[in-house]
Amino acid sequence: MFEQSRPDTKTQSALGLMELIYHSTVREIRKGHSNAVIGLLLNVVQTLTLVFAFYLLFVILGIRGSPIRGDFLLYIMSGIFVFITHVKTVSAVIGAEGPSSPMMKHAPMNTIVSITAAAFGQLYTQILSVAIVLYLYHIAFQPITIHDPAGAAGILFLAWFTGVAVGVMFVSVKPWAPQFVNVASTVYNRVNMIASGKMFVANQLPSRELNLFDWNPLFHIIDQGRGFLFLNYSPRYTFIDYPIKAGIVLIMLGLMAEFYTRKSASASWDASR
């Protein structure tokens, strides 16, 4: 009662913030299912289902070989892994606790911690899911050879980073127009089913069609990722620096807009949804 509180040092504050983010991340991971293992397995099943669906689609269309000399299923998975990581990160960040959420009444909780926890929770889930799927394929079907494993892993992180950036942009607008954000995020994810380029490679597109996709950072990420995965593919029309620059710009704009939104937060926002 009479104990005098002492201000924390910068190191203590940083450690406290990291601990808060850790516990919030654990909460985000367990939010989808009370059992974290079952939640992870559900995500693995979703990934496998999408891989199988695209494999059937290619077989029905008569495309049984990879446009890149190499493993056909690895070619399919190279696009799906990056696509799922990106769009699920966008959805997770959008679903993070907003400035008018009851959780924000518990100091030192804030929206940045909530967004960071949602992003790291999704990164953790996707990395484990990709590792499990690749391991199962490696031991059950045929050994996997990746030309540049470090570069391929970096591409997955880049897909996650750009997903965070796009998600933060949506989060900054969500309190003002929640219905618009729900529709816009759904449209964004659906458009990326085609615009991400996971079903084709940029080197085989004519310039007229290439102009329809090269605006999309995810298109560059997937195509560059295949350059790291396959020895016989060198991307000529996509660039690794474009999604990096786009992600930095989007996340800075989103954080500035989110800061303004947080200052204008009203409890009536949640009541009006």
Image (tube, rainbow, N blue to C red):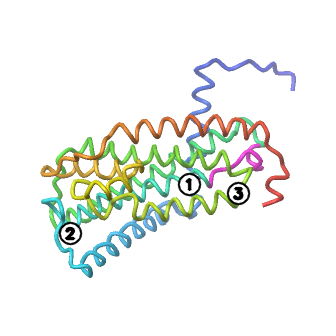
Q: Are marks 1 and 2 in contact (CB under 8 Å)?
A: no
Q: Pick whichever of labels 1 and 3 is earlier in the sequence.
A: 1
Find the distance from the CA under tag 1 to the CA under tag 3. 15 Å
Q: Is residue 39 left or right of residue 148?
A: right
Q: Pick whichever of labels 1 and 2 is earlier in the sequence.
A: 1
Q: Residues within 10 Å of mark 1 (few under 14, many from 20)?
A: many
Q: Position of residue 197 (x, y in %)?
A: 34, 59
- Residue on which the image places disc 1: 92
Q: Is residue 178 left or right of residue 117?
A: right
Q: Pick whichever of labels 3 and 2 is earlier in the sequence.
A: 2
3 vs 2, front mark: 3
- Residue on which the image places disc 2: 140
Quadrant where the N terminus is found in the figure: top right
Nearer to us in this view, 193 or 98 = 193
Find the distance from the CA under tag 1 to the CA under tag 2. 32 Å
Give the structural element (helix, strand or loop) at label 1: helix
What amino acid is labelled 1 in the image?
Answer: Ala
Q: Quadrant of residue 64?
A: bottom left
What amino acid is labelled 3 in the image?
Answer: Pro
Quadrant where the C terminus is found in the figure: bottom right
Nearer to us in this view, 245 or 92 = 245
Q: Residues within 10 Å of mark 3 (few under 14, many from 20)?
A: some
Give the structural element (helix, strand or loop) at label 3: helix
